[in-house]
Image (cartoon, helix red, strand yellow):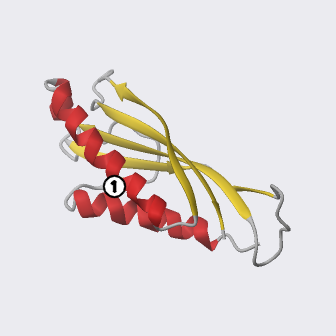
C-alpha cells in the first residue's frame, strides 16, 4: 500500500502552521513544556501529533492504487500569554483551526474538527490549547 499521503499530510500541516506562525517552533510530540538553557520555559511553541493511519476497505477494492485511510492529528499551541489572556488564545485558536481545515481542499477526503480543550498551566508548564482533527481520505 502507498501511504505517501500520510507523509504529505504531515508536511502540509507543518507548512500551514508555519505560514501563519513563521517564527514559532513546531515539535512532533505531545509536550506542554520546553525548557531553555537558563531553566526558563519556552514562551511559544506548537506540538503536532499524528496517530498511525489505518486503511479500510469501506466498499472499495484495496490495491496499490485505491485505498481509504483514516487518521487523527492533534495540534497543540502553547504560549505564556494565555496565562493572562484566554480571550487572546481563543482568537489564535480560530487562526489555527482555519489553517488546518483549509487542507481539506488539498486532500481527496475530509478533515473534521473532532474537539478542542484549553490546557491550563500546571507545575510550571506553559498554558495552551489543543485541537483534535479526524482525517478520512481516499485516492
| 53 over 42 or under it: above or below | below
The answer to whether residue 42 is seen in the rendering is no
Q: Name the residue nearer the viewer: 88 or 119.
A: 88
Quarter where residue 22 is shown: bottom left
Left or right? Give the position of 72 relative to 53. Answer: left
Q: Residue at x 23, y 41 (%)?
A: 92
Q: At which x and y percent is residue 62?
A: 83, 68
- Horizontal relation, residue 119 to residue 7: left or right: left
Q: Position of residue 38 (x, y in %)?
A: 18, 42
Q: Vertical placement of 71 versus 82: above or below?
A: below
Place residue 121 in its image quadrant: top left
Of residues 76 and 123, the one nearer the viewer is 76
Image quarter in which the N terminus is found: bottom right
Image quadrant occupied by the C terminus: bottom right
Instruction: Write the residue at 47% across / 68% down.
Output: 106
Residue depicted at 59% across the width and 65% down the height: 6
- Name the residue at 21% across, 37% down: 91
Residue with the mark numbered 1 = 99
Residue 30, x across and y down, in percent: 46, 41
What number of labels is visible?
1
**Residue 87 visible in the picture:** yes
Q: Is residue 26 left or right of residue 3?
A: left
* Residue 129 horizontal/vertical position (percent): 34, 34
Residue at the bottom extreme?
65
Front residue of this view, candidates 100 and 74: 100
Tell me the element at label 1: helix
Q: Residues within 10 Å of mark 1 (few under 14, many from 20)?
A: some
Amino acid at each position: 500500500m502507498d501511504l505517501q499521503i500520510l507523509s504529505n499530510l504531515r508536511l502540509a500541516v507543518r507548512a500551514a502552521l508555519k505560514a501563519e506562525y513563521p517564527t514559532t517552533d513546531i515539535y512532533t510530540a505531545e509536550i506542554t513544556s520546553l525548557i531553555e538553557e537558563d531553566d526558563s520555559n519556552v514562551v511559544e511553541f506548537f506540538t503536532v501529533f499524528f496517530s498511525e493511519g489505518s486503511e479500510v476497505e469501506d466498499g472499495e477494492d484495496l490495491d496499490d492504487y485505491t485505498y481509504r485511510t483514516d487518521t487523527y492529528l492533534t495540534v497543540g499551541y502553547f504560549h505564556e500569554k494565555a496565562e493572562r489572556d484566554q480571550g487572546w488564545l481563543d482568537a489564535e485558536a480560530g487562526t489555527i483551526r482555519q489553517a488546518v481545515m483549509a487542507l481539506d481542499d488539498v486532500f481527496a477526503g475530509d478533515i473534521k474538527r473532532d474537539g478542542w480543550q484549553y490546557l491550563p498551566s500546571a507545575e510550571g508548564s506553559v498554558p495552551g490549547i489543543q485541537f483534535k482533527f479526524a482525517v478520512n481520505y481516499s485516492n
